[in-house]
């Protein structure tokens, strides 16, 4: 157990639907990062939050949004889902705002859009 | 923007040594990290180089040359369990924030 908790582990939903992925960072970590990994692809950065505030944005679609709550857990909302959104979604946390030294990843949410 | 290049696939035999290279083009470079990911699993942190030179952690070593925008991960005494994907990642700070940008990954297959 890495200490980063992601729920649900698996999600199957239809095109056009909306889903929410949840992440609880490792205790003490203030930064949360969301990444998308499509089949046999690298990790694409979506968005970062630090202590409740959005810190950096990557190639995140307008249909996607995220937030970090006062208890530091984060949610990634995906709406108007398309087949191409099927992927593994990872959350990672780090203790500092920079986060470059070492991320701790959760086990991911596998999203399948049918 | 940032770009990282690493081989897509490497094959080696058990007990051998393998080197996975990574070249990068970034702005505001702060360091190079390596992550291991087994099929269906989460990436796990292996090493981080902020300065030039070699960092050793057990059977794994990582090297960085900032002047060449190049680094590598060296795996010694390969074991079957080392079969996984390995990602290099650069830490980049910018006015927009800071995050890790990952390469496309190198799939390592260790054969008996």
Image (tube, rainbow, N blue to C red):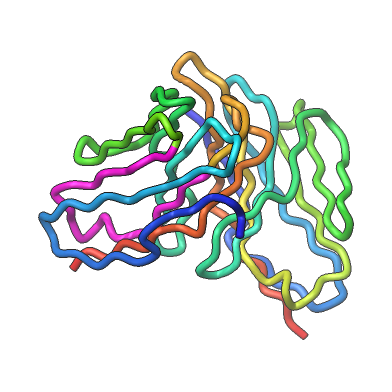
B33 drawn magenta: no
- Number of numbered markers: 0
Q: Which quarter of the rendered picture does the C terminus of chain B lie within?
A: bottom right
Horizontal side, residue B108 vs residue A109: left or right: right
Horizontal side, residue A104 vs residue A34: left or right: right
Q: Quadrant of residue B67?
A: top right
Q: Quadrant of residue A102?
A: top right
The location of residue A41, given as percent across then percent down, is 45, 57
Residue located 43% across and 42% down the image = A34
The location of residue B78, given as percent across then percent down, is 82, 71
Range drawn in magenta: A73-92
Residue located 76% across and 30% down the image = B50
Given residues B66 and A114, the one toward you in this image is A114
The location of residue B27, given as percent across then percent down, is 57, 22
Horizontal side, residue B2 vs residue B49: left or right: left
Given residues B26 and A86, the one toward you in this image is A86
Residue A56's place in the image compared with A109, above or below, is above
The location of residue A77, given as percent across then percent down, is 26, 44
A74 drawn magenta: yes
The residue lying furthest to the top in this view is B95
Residue B18's place in the image compared with B100, above or below, is below
The residue lying furthest to the front in this view is A71
Residue A47's place in the image compared with B95, above or below, is below
The residue lying furthest to the left in this view is A16
Horizontal side, residue A111 vs residue B57: left or right: left
Residue located 67% across and 25% down the image = B30
Residue B27's place in the image compared with A47, above or below, is above
Residue located 39% across and 57% down the image = A7
């Amino acid at each position: 157990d890495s200490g980063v908790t992601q729920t649900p582990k698996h999600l199957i939903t239809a095109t056009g639907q909306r889903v929410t992925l949840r992440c609880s960072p490792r205790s003490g970590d203030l930064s949360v990062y969301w990444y998308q990994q499509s089949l046999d692809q690298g990790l694409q950065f979506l968005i970062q939050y630090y202590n409740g505030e959005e810190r950096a944005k990557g190639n995140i679609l307008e249909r996607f949004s995220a937030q970090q709550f006062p208890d530091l857990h984060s949610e990634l909302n995906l709406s108007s889902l398309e087949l191409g959104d099927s992927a593994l979604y990872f959350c990672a946390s780090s203790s500092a705002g920079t986060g470059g030294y070492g991320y701790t990843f959760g086990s991911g949410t596998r999203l399948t859009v049918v | 923007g940032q770009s990282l290049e690493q081989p897509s696939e490497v094959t080696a035999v058990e007990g051998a040594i393998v080197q996975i290279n990574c070249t990068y083009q970034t702005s505001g470079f702060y360091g190079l990290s390596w992550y291991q990911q087994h099929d269906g699993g989460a990436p796990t942190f292996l090493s981080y180089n902020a300065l030039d030179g070699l960092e050793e952690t057990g059977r794994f070593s990582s090297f960085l040359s900032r002047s060449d925008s190049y680094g590598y991960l060296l795996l010694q005494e390969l074991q079957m369990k080392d079969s996984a994907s390995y990602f290099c990642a650069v830490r980049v700070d910018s006015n927009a924030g800071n995050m890790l940008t990952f390469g496309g990954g190198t799939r390592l297959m260790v054969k008996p």
